[in-house]
Amino acid sequence: MSDDGCDLLCLDLPKAEAIRLTLPDAGRLAAWADAAKALTDPTRLSIVLSLREGGATCVCDLAWIVGRPEKLVSHHLRLLRAAGAASSRRDRRMVMYELTPAGHTLVDGLLRAAEAVR
């Protein structure tokens, strides 16, 4: 057997059941996984870090900041909006993006975790 598994089939049923009862339902787990996935791409991560630093920012500025084409940045911003990490609003002819409270929480949590594993 591999080093990743037990050599014996055993189950601490009281412990396992107590832990299982603390897990959120499948829908909530899927939503959390989707939110976490929003930060797994380097371009999206650079975008959220830029929004964290600069607040509301237009797409063209974000494209210049992260050094990526505007169409690509727009695509990633749509994904961040869909995940609930960013929001947008039209300001005349520009579309401004900013982190949502959930987006701030995700970024802050990721940065704390990254610091802990250094």
Image (cartoon, rainbow, N blue to C red):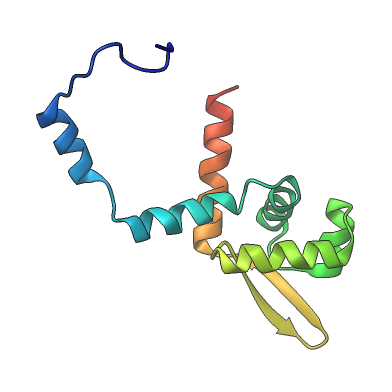
Q: Position of residue 44 (x, y in %)?
A: 70, 53
> Residue 47's x, y, as percent?
73, 55
Q: Give the left or right position of residue 98, taking residue 65 as reference.
A: left
Identify the residue shown where x is 22% and y is 18%: 9
Which residue occupies 68% across, 62% down?
55
Q: Nearer the viewer, residue 114 or 2?
A: 2
Snapshot quadrant of residue 68:
bottom right
Image spot of residue 10 (x, y percent): 18, 19
Q: How many marks?
A: 0
**Left or right placement of residue 15 versus residue 89 in this view:** left
Q: Quadrant of the C terminus?
A: top right
Quadrant of the drawing holding the N terminus: top left
Q: Quadrant of residue 84?
A: bottom right
User: Which of the two residues, 86 or 41, is positioned nearer the viewer here?
Assistant: 41
In this view, the residue farthest toward the bottom is 92
Q: Is residue 2 above or below residue 27?
A: above
**Residue 81, picture quadrant:** bottom right
Residue at horizontal 52 percent and vertical 55 percent from the top: 35
Is residue 89 shown left or right of residue 19? right
Q: Residue furthest left?
A: 14
Q: Where in the figure is residue 93, as x and y percent of width and height?
A: 83, 86
Q: Is residue 82 left or right of residue 31?
A: right
Say if 16 sits above or below 52 in the image.
above
Q: Is residue 6 above or below residue 37?
A: above
Residue at 57% in and 50% down: 37
